[in-house]
Image (tube, grey):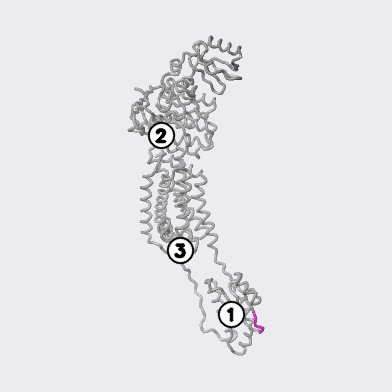
Amino acid sequence: MSAIEVQDLKKFYGATRAVDGVSFSVGRGEIFGMLGPNGAGKTTTTEILEGLRAPDSGTVQVLGMDVIRHPQDIKERIGVQLQTTALYPRLTVREVLDLFATFYRGGKRSTDELIEMMNLGEKQKTQSKDLSGGQRQRLSVALALINKPEILFLDEPTTGLDPQARRSLWEVIRAVNREGTTVFITTHYMDEAQTLCQRVAVVDGGRIIALDSPDALIHQSFRETAIEFDQKGTKAPEGTYRSLQGVTRPAVRENGHVTIYTENAALTLGGLTDLAEAGTIQFDDLHLRRATLEDVFLKLTGKRIRE
Amino acid sequence: MKTFFQLYLSNLREFSRNRLAMFWSVAFPVLFILLFGTTFSGTSDTTFNIGVAVEDSGTIGSALAQSFDGVQAFRITQGTTADLLEELQQGKLSAVIVIPDGVSAAVLAGKDANVEVHYDPSNQTTSQVVLTIVEKVVGGFEQSLTHQSALLTIQPVTTTVSSLRTVDFLLPGILAMALMQLGVMATAPPLVQLREQQILRRLGATPLSRSMLLAAQVCLRLTIGLTQTVLLILVGSLLFHVHIIGNWIVLAGFVVLGALMFVSLGYLMSGLAKTQDSIMGLSQLINFPMMFLSGLFFPVDMMPSWIKPVINAMPLTYLADGLRQIMVGATPLHSLQFDLIVLAAWLVVCAVLAVRFFRWE
């Protein structure tokens, strides 16, 4: 039995189609990601799964339970971290954790264990209104872990964290996942989805536009290599790069930064060198890289995720 | 039960660390009673500034003038008639006594003589007291002149009259105000804050039941209401010797009724206001008219009659009236049963509407 089963989910706010016919299923023990820009419908979908919002239509089964009809029953078995992380502003970290612990019946993680896990030791006596954004984010994740949930829902959990804190949160997520917890995570960070998730649903405008493992997504969309460089001096005329040998698609130009996708990097690089020698273009900081989810998103939607 | 206790404790911590809510519900009423109590509870130190002008050049005129010096309630200024009358007009003197020229001569000749007292009749208390004293002094002086003993003397017998001092009147009113602010200022805005910051939403993602959440919040408010009561009564009776006559159980019951009523009003307000800014405006909009139009600080019959319908519409009027009757035995505006019924009706209406308009997000 899968952990989450969603069929044709729809939620409209007036003319806005926040969630527009989404279907997917998440297996037990999986780390499943929803990747997309702000406003893609990630939060709305997540909150429907958590039983916090009713959809306009569609069915949702979480751990075999119909959360739309019985939103209260599932709450004992899931852990929820919301995007807004405000809590009782004048309670300390330890007090908030102690309070939330009394809401759950079953086997629980102790407050000490959670403080240790989320590295909040120094801040345990700080009132939540005095925490930094990142600290509040970690407290918010700690609250989601109290009841040893079967499914952990994380809505953009690393927003506002510094790189080191992000990596240590990923470690926590992997650790609870190894203990058997299914993880449902939304993010607009490509690297997060790519390194953390076993499968990723790429969403835009309330629809899933691709769904597979990060590697499969990249390989399906791209057999190409990306060549990137900063263009100096005069702009090359439109179509210059497209006509180079090996190039598969029009180049992407952004503020002088050029990305060319090629099936044959050697041939394309040769062509670029010729252009440079002829004085048509000048470039700086040229490098090759494999395609990423960012490229997948760009290819599928024609825009970058963080615009 | 453990959940309830933890929730109650957390709400208590949250509340007691919130300076604004603490100020309105605890410090503000105490400050009020300290301020008003100090202003109105002192023994009335009534001395009158009296001008005495002696135009008479004989011995009797000056002797009569001297006899006013003996009156403790008078602070005597001597001067010419013209000067003193000007000071009277400027309000520096309460009255001016003029002993006209020829008084000595007239008295010695056995004729009638007049002593003039100039005063402002619009100031009734002063003029009556001053006139009475002047008459008495002049009468005594006359007796000493004629050496007749008075046939009737006054034998003073003291007795304590149970009249309410201002501070006695104010204490129950300020308690009523505190209970009103508990709902209007210390319940509604924090609740909107919990909702706006999606804290209610986060709690909604746990198995915690909503009725448990509300029960803990309402119980905390009742605790605060009873604490306010004890605090105000302590300050009132220890510092200002307000004598609480009422039955404690009746008093506690009335306080709980009042607190519940205004807390439900607070919940209703939080349901009606969308943002934190609008709830602050709405709170003040309700707080101030209630404070001043419910007869908290002065008796309702002192207010102009056109405002009476407004006063009668305010639930605070009935809470204050009831508390005044229970605590200090004040003259009822309405019967206690009537106050009770009006408050209970307000409670039911507010509670029903609060449930109807309550929003978790």
Disc 2 marks a residue whose amino acid type is Ala
In this view of the protein, can residue A145 be seen by the observer?
Answer: no
Above or below residue B120? Residue B245 is above
Q: Main secondary structure of the magenta part?
A: loop
**Percent x, y of residue B345:** 36, 53
Residue linked to disc 1: B116
Residue linked to disc 2: B205
Above or below residue B64? Residue B194 is above
Mark 2 vs mark 3: give the one in front: 3
Q: Earlier in the sequence, mark 2 or mark 3?
A: 2
Residue linked to disc 3: B304
Instruction: Pinpoint the chain carrying mark 1.
Output: B
Assess whether residue B57 is covered by the magenta stretch: yes
- The N terminus of chain B lies in which quarter of the figure? top left
Disc 1 marks a residue whose amino acid type is Glu
Q: Residues within 10 Å of mark 1 (few under 14, many from 20)?
A: few
Mark 1 vs mark 2: give the one in front: 1
- The C terminus of chain B lies in which quarter of the figure? top left
Q: In the image, which residues are magenta?
A: B54-58
Q: Secondary structure at mark 1?
A: strand
Instruction: Pinpoint the chain carrying mark 2.
Output: B
Q: Secondary structure at mark 3?
A: loop
In depth, the one of A181 and B105 nearer the eye is B105
Disc 3 marks a residue whose amino acid type is Pro
In depth, the one of B65 and A271 nearer the eye is A271
